[in-house]
Amino acid sequence: MSSNTIAVVTGSNSGIGRSTAIHLAQKGFTVYGTMRSLDRGQKLSKMAEAAGVSVLPIVCDVTDSSSVADAMSQVLADAGSIDVLVNNAGVGGNGTVEECSIDRFAEVMDVNLHGAVRCIQAVLPQMRERGSGTIVNVTSIIGQFAAVGQAPYVASKFAAEGMSEELAHELAPFGIRVVIVQPGVVKTAILPKNMDVPNKTGAYDMHYQRLFDFYAAGLQAPGDPADTAATIYEAITTDEPKLRWTCGWGGPEITASRPKVTNEQWVALGAIHDSEAYRARFQELFGLNISPPTQAVG
């Protein structure tokens, strides 16, 4: 990547997006960081200044097609090109399939899948014309592993993975790379915002407890957004490109283990009622200890 590489990072006002925007700027990229309101970018501005770089803020609501088109047009008019698009904007979504409303499914999908598609469609024409460019879609290990109690989030991330895989195939003839980055548990603002569960029936107490056990274990040693930012930079600039990259707590273990776990083993895991037996079997299958900290044995 040249020193005048133009990058757009969505959802750059916090977490992984903010760290990525600053990291790319430190590496010499010209970075535009999108957010729904410029008021949300104060911490980004302060952190960028402290790092000795600047990130150009731009208003963009990824759930609004006109907002996306306007934002990308503004960058193109200002910079002349968009070389790298990092689709990072995302939301969580808890709930079992039975208990989660269709509206909630739609809200999560509109950000995590449709938002990325809107941005991709806005940048692709000029990338195709130039015959170069990189699109980074930040998904999640939840796009490989259907974590219980997060049906809307799981659906959106599985969908984003499938869309990204197809996109990589479609764009290969045009010299445009697609990268899927799958963070595990990373310490960001999205986690405390997603502690509520519907629990309308009371039938899924066990499932929600397993959801909380997983994240509580991850938060004992969570990934740092800066590490994800470094992974994204490496994925963009490597001389040995690959489609999928992972990082964060549980990322390497889940992505390596899930293909080896049969569908029957996955269903049988869900059928285990005893919590201790469930955790032990989970560790056997995925190599992760999700016991509460007081019960952790290794």
Image (cartoon, grey):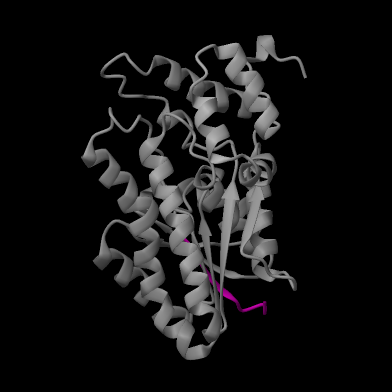
At a point 58% along the width and 64% down the height, the residue shown is 179
User: Going by the picture, which residue comes out furthest to the front?
Assistant: 264
User: Is residue 10 left or right of 84 when viewed as pictured?
Assistant: left
At a point 30% along the width and 52% down the height, the residue shown is 110
Residue at figure coordinates x 54%, y 46% from the top left: 144
Residue 91 on the magenta segment: no
Residue stretch in magenta: 1-10
- Is residue 26 visible in the rendered image? The answer is no
The residue nearer to you, when weighing 226 against 196, is: 196
Query: Which residue: 29% across, 42% down?
Result: 105
Q: Position of residue 102 (x, y in %)?
A: 22, 40
| Residue 107 appearing in the image | yes
Give the quarter of the figure containing the C terminus: top right
The image quarter containing residue 197 is top left
- The question of residue 9 being in magenta is answered with yes
Q: Quadrant of the N terminus?
A: bottom right
Q: In the drawing, does residue 144 fall left or right of residue 28?
A: left
